[in-house]
Image (cartoon, rainbow, N blue to C red):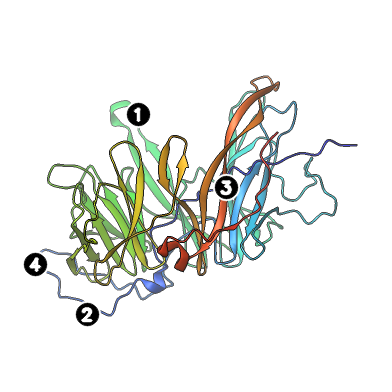
Amino acid sequence: MKTPRTIAAALLAALTLAACAPASGTQTSAPAAAPAAGQDPAPDTAAGAGLRILTAGNADGMYAAVTVSEPGSRIFPTLLSWIDYASARQVILCSRPNCDHSDDSCPARLPAGAGEAGCYALDDGLLLKYSVTDPDTYELTGQYLYLCAADGSDPRLLAQTAANWDFLTDGDAVYYSCQQVEGQDADALAQSVWYRQPLSGGQAEELFRCDIGDMLVCCAGRELVQVNWFDNALYAVNADTGVRRTLPMTPAGEDGQSSAFAALDGRLYQLLPGDTDTLRWLDIASGQAGTLALQWPDGAAAGEPGPFSAAGGKLLLELGDGAGNYRRVAVDPADGSVTEVPLQFMDGSYLQPVRILAEGGSQLYVQYETRFESVTLPGKSGEPVPGETAVPRTALISYTDFFAGVPNYRDVETLPAVQ
């Protein structure tokens, strides 16, 4: 009789919310202003479907790669799983009856040595990225991008590529970048090369190249909005033509400190360092800009600005007390009104806002507790080594309860930790 494997609920997929609304919601009703002298005109983004940043989840659930404790294995195997919001359960994406997921016959199991797996939910499928390492030498042997059916079946190789973690789609193709270095020593030039990979298959097409320091912020229509802290500039790059225009917003404050950004309904909001009274905003398509005065409740202390994001139609700002503890407030972009979101938990020694893992329809998938469990991990020679791992306790909560600070959690039954 085979020893049952237990499975770690460590979510290896990228769980950070993309701070970018789908392109269908990025246009505003405000009329486009005529470009100022010397300012690049806003491009026509009507051709082709808009781009959106892919995440691990959709309205129905979220994909996650999990690891299997396997005695004697130097690199633990990886399985695909699905966190189903309707049933509030995490399940292995395996359709074989009575399968114990112990060998390559399991359809949810990635090849031996697979790791660094990323799952991305498409409208009708799963985009899967992973690398393979030789379990004896620990050398990288390959990096792969697969397209699977929504249930994880029928994997089809799209490309062998060292793609970065950001993936975009317009429904017909996926877009990604790879780092590329040309030349040697002092003449070496590092760039990010963006590609378009049709979901129907075929060769990836190189689209454009940009500075390796250009970091993706969000999408608007057919444009990628990127920040370059070295240039202290924001750019919008057309994915089809590679044409880049400079946006009229300076990323860093007057003291050179980096600001934070959140995108919502076609606008990019900027939180300047140390400023909790005003947000700057920019309509990406038209170039119109303005400010939003924050209306704090009487007696509310702002605190040290931290992570800045958007969810549920509101801007979310985390504020620190200088000692490692944080709380969260919600900002209504319509009038700047600020309300506390008093849902927190102890993460180690510090008080933190509940961690938003994904948005799903009318609810959020969150972590609201951390517990520690004993585990057995593989040593360098494959011998079992005892250890401890942090296991998140996760749940679903409606937007209404979340913004009201009501801890009406619906616990999600996740897979047990590695033993």
Q: Earlier in the sequence, mark 1 or mark 2?
A: 2
Residue 48 relative to residue 67: left or right: left
Where 178 falls versus 52 (above or below)?
A: above
Camera-side residue: 139 or 377?
377
The answer to the question of whether label 1 and label 3 lie on touching residues, with beta carbons closer than 8 A, is: no
Residue at the right extreme, as displayed:
1
Q: Is mark 2 on a helix, strand or loop?
A: loop
**Residue 288 falls in which quadrant of the image?**
bottom left
Query: What residue sits right under mark 2 in the picture?
Result: 31
Residue 157's x, y, as percent? 63, 52
Q: What element carries label 1?
A: loop
Are the two marked residues, 2 and 4, in contact with CB atoms closer than 8 angstroms?
Answer: no
> Which of the 4 image quarters holds residue 86?
bottom right
**What residue would you read off at disc 3?**
393
Disc 3 packing (10 Å; few <14; some 14–19; many ≥20): some
**Mark 4 and 1 residues: CB-CB less than 8 Å, in contact?**
no
Q: Which mark is residue 37?
A: 4
**Are the residues at dot 3 and dot 4 in contact (C-beta closer than 8 Å)?**
no
Mark-to-mark CA distance, 3 and 2: 46 Å
Judge whether 24 appears above or below 202 on screen. Answer: below
Residue visible at 23% across and 70% down? 42
Find residue 217 and report its horizontal and vertical position in percent: 34, 55
Report the disc number at residue 184: 1
Task: Determine contact: label 1, label 2, CB under 8 Å.
Answer: no
Instruction: Label 4: state its secondary structure.
Output: loop
| Horizontal and vertical percent position of residue 203 | 54, 55
User: In x, y percent, where is residue 405?
Assistant: 42, 60
* N-term mark: 4 or 1: 4
Instruction: Please tell me whether mark 2 or mark 4 is closer to you in this view.
Output: 2
